[in-house]
Image (cartoon, grey):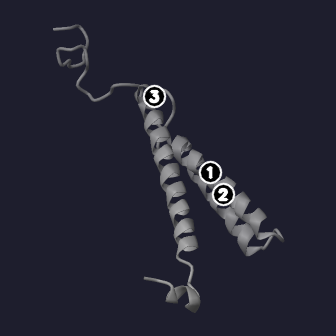
């Protein structure tokens, strides 16, 4: 029996399920994340409803940027993701997920564009030449 108060599985690992540092958030951490999320949601709402910018593309770009910032706020304050948790595996899983999402979205847009281009309506003359 070891002089530690932890149960071990015989392989030097404790059986509490903690394989790395698990960040514990406080109420103030959750409140910071909540208020940041509310602000990052209210700003795009104000931009659209107040028609702040003349060009719609400017509004869209700002909303996309604020959305990306909000993703990071959620990952840090609510999902507690950083490079130390689980030996960095959570960040590796995030990178893999982002790569798959980019490949899926890019491939889908590429397929839809080419389908739209290749499925254009034919003229009556072109239809007569069809087999």
Return the x and y of residue 43 as percentages of the image width and height: 70, 62
Task: Give the quarter of the image for residue 118.
Answer: bottom right
- The residue beneath circle 1 is 68
Picture layout, residue 18 above or below residue 113: above
Which quadrant, please, contains the N terminus? top left
Mark 3 secondary-structure assignment? helix
Which quadrant, please, contains the C terminus? bottom left
Q: CA distance from mark 2 to mark 3?
A: 27 Å
Q: Looking at the image, is mark 2 or mark 3 earlier in the sequence?
A: 2
- The residue beneath circle 3 is 88
The reply to whether residue 74 is visible in this rendering is yes
Residue 64 tag number:
2
Instruction: Give the camera-side residue of 33 and 68.
Output: 68
Return the x and y of residue 52 as percentages of the image width and height: 81, 69
Q: Are marks 1 and 2 in contact (CB under 8 Å)?
A: yes
Q: Looking at the image, is mark 3 or mark 1 earlier in the sequence?
A: 1
Residue 25 tag number:
none
Query: What is the tally of numbered marks visible in this picture?
Result: 3
Return the x and y of residue 77 as percentages of the image width and height: 53, 43
Picture layout, residue 102 above or below residue 128: above
């Amino acid at each position: 029996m070891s002089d530690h108060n932890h149960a071990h599985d015989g392989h030097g690992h404790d059986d509490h399920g903690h394989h790395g540092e698990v960040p514990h958030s406080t109420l103030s951490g959750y409140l910071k994340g909540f208020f940041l999320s509310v602000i990052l949601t209210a700003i795009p709402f104000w931009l659209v409803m107040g028609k702040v910018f003349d060009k719609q593309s400017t509004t869209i770009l700002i909303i996309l940027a604020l959305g990306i910032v909000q993703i990071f706020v959620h990952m840090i304050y609510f999902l507690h993701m950083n490079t130390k948790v689980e030996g960095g595996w959570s960040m590796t899983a995030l990178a893999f997920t982002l790569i798959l999402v980019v490949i899926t979205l890019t491939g889908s847009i590429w397929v839809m564009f080419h389908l739209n281009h290749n499925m254009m309506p034919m003229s009556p003359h072109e239809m007569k030449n069809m087999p």
